[in-house]
C-alpha cells in the first residue's frame, strides 16, 4: 500500500475516533476504542459549578459482571484499584467515576486515570486472580 491511501485511511479512522452527543443532563462520549470487543463510552456532566464527573458507560459494568461472574464479590478490590487512580466505585450503578474540579484536573487526565482503573479492574478473574474468589 502506498503512503497516500494509508494516510487517507488513518485520517478517516481518526476523524471517527470520538463521537459526542449532548442532552439536558450531560454529554455522552463514545471513543473508537474497545474494551474486549465492546465500545467504550463515558458520560461527562457538571455536578456543581466548575465540578465535573466522568463516569463509565453501561458496557463496562456489563463486561465486569461477565468477567467476574459477580462483581459484588470484588467490592474491596475494585475500590482499592479505583482509589489508586483517583476514581470511585458506585456498586449500585456498576460504574467507575472521577469527580473533579476543572482547574485541578483536565478532562483528558480524568479520562486516562479512569481508563487505567478500567484496564486493571476489567482483568479481575481473567488475569488477576484472588484466592477464594470465583
Image (cartoon, rainbow, N blue to C red):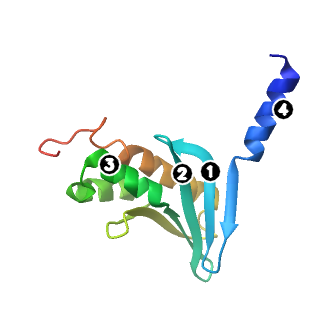
How far separated are the C-alphas under marks 4 and 3? 37 Å
Q: At 46% across and 60% down in the image, what residue appears? A: 58
**Marks 2 and 3: which is nearer the front?**
3
Can I make out residue 106 in this image?
Answer: no
The kind of secondary structure element at disc 4 is helix
Q: In the image, residue 52 lies at what x, y percent? A: 58, 72
Between 80 and 34, the one nearer to me in the picture: 34
Pointer 3: what residue?
66
Pointer 2: what residue?
40
How far separated are the C-alphas under marks 3 and 1? 22 Å
Q: In the image, residue 90 lies at what x, y percent? A: 36, 68
Residue furthest right in the image: 4
Q: Could you tell which of marks 3 and 1 lies nearer the N-terminus?
A: 1
- Pointers 1 and 2 in contact (C-beta within 8 Å): yes
> Is residue 99 shown above or below 119?
below
The kind of secondary structure element at disc 2 is strand
Amino acid at each position: 500500500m502506498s503512503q497516500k491511501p494509508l494516510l487517507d485511511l488513518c485520517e478517516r479512522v481518526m476523524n471517527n475516533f470520538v463521537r459526542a452527543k449532548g442532552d439536558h443532563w450531560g454529554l455522552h462520549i463514545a471513543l473508537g476504542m474497545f474494551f474486549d470487543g465492546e465500545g467504550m463510552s463515558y458520560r461527562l456532566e457538571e455536578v456543581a459549578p466548575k465540578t465535573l464527573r466522568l463516569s463509565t458507560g453501561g458496557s463496562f459494568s456489563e463486561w465486569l459482571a461477565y468477567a467476574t461472574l459477580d462483581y459484588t464479590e470484588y467490592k474491596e478490590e475494585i475500590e482499592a484499584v479505583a482509589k489508586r487512580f483517583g476514581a470511585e466505585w458506585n456498586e449500585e450503578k456498576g460504574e467507575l467515576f472521577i469527580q473533579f474540579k476543572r482547574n485541578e484536573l483536565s478532562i483528558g487526565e480524568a479520562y486516562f486515570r479512569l481508563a487505567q482503573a478500567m484496564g486493571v479492574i476489567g482483568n479481575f478473574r481473567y488475569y488477576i486472580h484472588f484466592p477464594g474468589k470465583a
